[in-house]
Image (spheres, helix red, strand yellow):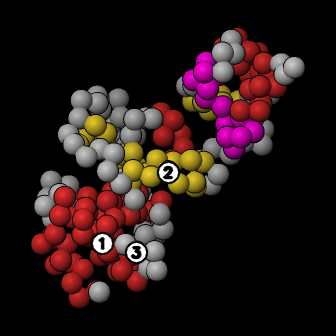
Amino acid sequence: MMTNKEKILEIAKKNNGIILTNQVTEAKIPRAVLINMVNEEILFPVQRGIYVTDEGYIDDFYLLQARFPKGIFSHETALYLQGYSDRAPILPTMTFKYGTSTSRMKGEIRPVIVSSNFELGRIEIEKNGSKLIIYDVERTLVDLLKPRYDTDFEQFIPAIKRYTASKDKDINKLFKYAQHFGLEVELQKYIGGLL
């Protein structure tokens, strides 16, 4: 039978050497075991509720996802994470459901609040061995056309060009999203000459 320590290390092993306090709680392991493992230098605290083993690798995006688990990486950040932009975001953008308090996020991320369609286009990707929740590229491109979002067109234009040249593009899905958000005319302006 596995000891609690071994169980924690097993969870961490499956998670790139990272263990979250809530994973320990879900596994019904006393938190005291975590504290002992930190004291024994088996685990190292990274930030509140996040620990890493010696071999563990902590990705900044994963840390943000762990801190703000209700958020979905979006806009320029989603472009970067999916390889449609070479520019790493200085302040990553995450989208949250209406009603989420954003006061403690300021300075760490750029929160965007939506009242509906929060789940539309939500996917999970793996980046540097960590699982991240982001919007697919079609939703991302459409989100960047929304008038109330201050889009960086120096990133948007090359991204839409890369997208239209990509073998993975799904133009039907892109236009379906644009139609859903009432942005098909706007999208046509940018994509018309590229197809």
Quadrant occupied by the C terminus:
bottom left
Q: Is residue 126 left or right of residue 31?
A: left
Judging by the rendered image, the residue that carries numbered circle 1 is 172
The Cα atoms of the two marked residues, 3 and 2, are separated by 18 Å
Q: Which mark is residue 55?
A: none
Estimate the x, y position of residue 89 in percent, counting from the top left: 41, 57
Q: Nearer the viewer, mark 3 or mark 1?
A: 1
Q: Is residue 21 visible?
A: no
Q: Is residue 156 left or right of residue 39?
A: left
Q: Does the magenta-highlighted stretch encompass residue 16? A: yes
Question: Magenta part of the protein: which range?
Answer: 12-26
Q: Is residue 70 visible?
A: yes
Q: Which mark is residue 169?
A: 3
Which circle's residue, 1 or 2, is located before the other in the chain?
2
The residue shown at (78%, 18%) is: 4
The Cα atoms of the two marked residues, 3 and 1, are separated by 9 Å
Q: Residues within 10 Å of mark 1 (few under 14, many from 20)?
A: few
Tag 3–tag 2 contact (CB < 8 Å) = no
Q: Quadrant of residue 20?
A: top right
